Amino acid sequence: MLNKILFGIVVAVIIAAVIYIPKAIRVYNVVHLFDEDKIVKNFMHMNKVFPSTPIKSSDTPHIFKTGTFELPEFYEMNGEQHQLLDALDYFKSDGLIVLHQGTLIYENYWQGNSKDQPHISWSVAKSFLSALIGIAYHDGLIEDLNDPITKYLKDFNGTGYENVPIIDILQMSSGIIFNEDYADYNSDINKFARALAQGTSMRDFAKALKNGKQPGTFNHYVSIDTQMLAMLLEKVTGQPVAKNLEDKIWTKIGMEHDAYYMVDDTGAAWALGGLNATLRDYAKFGQLYLNNGQWNNEQIVPEDWVHASHKPDGPHLQPGENKLSSSTWGYGYQWWVPGFPSTDYLAAGIYNQYIYIDPMTNVVIAKTSSNYKFNQEREHSKDAHVAMFRAIAKSAAESFQS
């Protein structure tokens, strides 16, 4: 009898270890994800930290034509000149690509990165999800962007997202109460990351959030808004986010490399920031938008959706000092608009990940980074990157004038 009891205890201990030790390790890895001595390796190997799901490359990869271009020596910010190469080093850049009229004119990698290495995109992934929502809307799978999201996601009735229009979620104006300060250990976004590491699903986490403002009146960045759009996409298409991306975009524009999404323990992709891909493939997505959603004479993303994506259409979405927004950048359909008179816009992720698009100069810039100092100088680093990108775009356009 005693032997049976001891055996049962041993089995219980083993089962507990199998269940809880991996989660404990994952929580530890999340807490130390951005440490100075770990961040570079982590950002290039996120599938070692979280489970993932693959996105297959195209059978007919698009290979960029190449040209020669030297980066400008300086960029200007707040009336002062700064050394551009010094800034790239200071912000711990991992890779930089510049396209002009679809030609690859500059490509460089640092910190062990390479053209074949996937890198975490963080919130750059939101702009990919926006494109998929646009395609689904164009295909009639979403009837009206003014519909409440609970028309499709009925299990969110009784939550903070009940009756929130899809358009307001798309434009980060849902009214959901959410603290996205990565420097604050107790912020909602950091609680979210730890909850995922412990096995909480993104769906369950979203259901616990509360609404604090009238939707469509105040622009406040809430990453879970994007995850709500991902749930909507999966509901109306009947396909996982990764499969949608693979079929609707990845294989159609000749992505060279396999990519992957991190997933939660239910297998749901982190559409809000879990896409990992190579820099060249990020640049292709930027070129797709510069082409107004067209690739090889095929309309991949609806042209009107591309245009609307970077045209802030409400007072709370306008760039500049805005009492109706928590950001000085404007916002569209999961794309940022730094400010007029420039027509540029960008996908942006924490720790300085970017896809920058400037229709006036026909320039696309893709950049990945592992800037461990990001939380201490968040706004400065964002503004510095826009200043750098504008200097590069201007120089590229001038260099290739016919």
Image (spheres, rainbow, N blue to C red):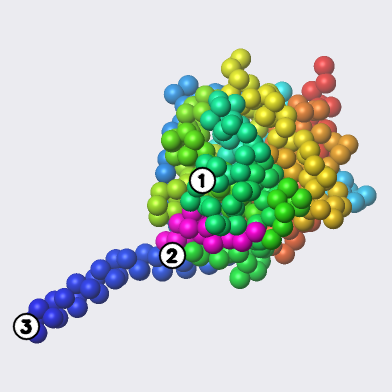
- Secondary structure, mark 1, is loop
- SS of the residue at dot 3? loop
Between 88 and 375, the one lying in front of the other is 375
Q: Nearer the viewer, residue 97 or 162?
A: 162
Q: Position of residue 384 (x, y in %)?
A: 79, 50
Q: Please tell me which residue is depicted at 74% across the width and 44% down the height of the picture.
A: 331
Inspect this view and state whether residue 333 appears.
yes
Looking at the image, the residue that sits furthest to the left is 1
Which residue occupies the foreground of this view, 269 or 48? Answer: 269
Residue 161 vs residue 370, the one in the foreground: 161
Q: Quadrant of residue 53?
A: top left
Q: Which mark is residue 198?
A: 2
Q: Which mark is residue 153?
A: 1
Residue 315 on the magenta segment: no
| Residue 128 in the image: above or below residue 35 | above
From the viewer's perspective, is 165 left or right of 317?
Answer: left
Label 3 crowd bin: few (<14), some (14–19), many (20+), radius 10 Å? few
User: Where does the image place residue 244, in percent across and percent down from the top left?
Assistant: 48, 34
* Residue 186 percent coordinates (x, y): 61, 71
| In the image, farthest residue toward the top | 297
Q: Is residue 174 above or below residue 254?
A: below
Say which residue label 3 marks: 1
As measured in the structure, the alpha-carbon distance from the residue carrying label 3 to the one carrying label 1 is 52 Å
Residue stretch rendered in magenta on the structure: 196-211
Residue type, label 1: Leu
**Residue positioned 93% across, 49% down in the render:** 79
Q: Mark 2 or mark 1, which is nearer to you? A: 1
Residue for point 49% across, 55% down: 202
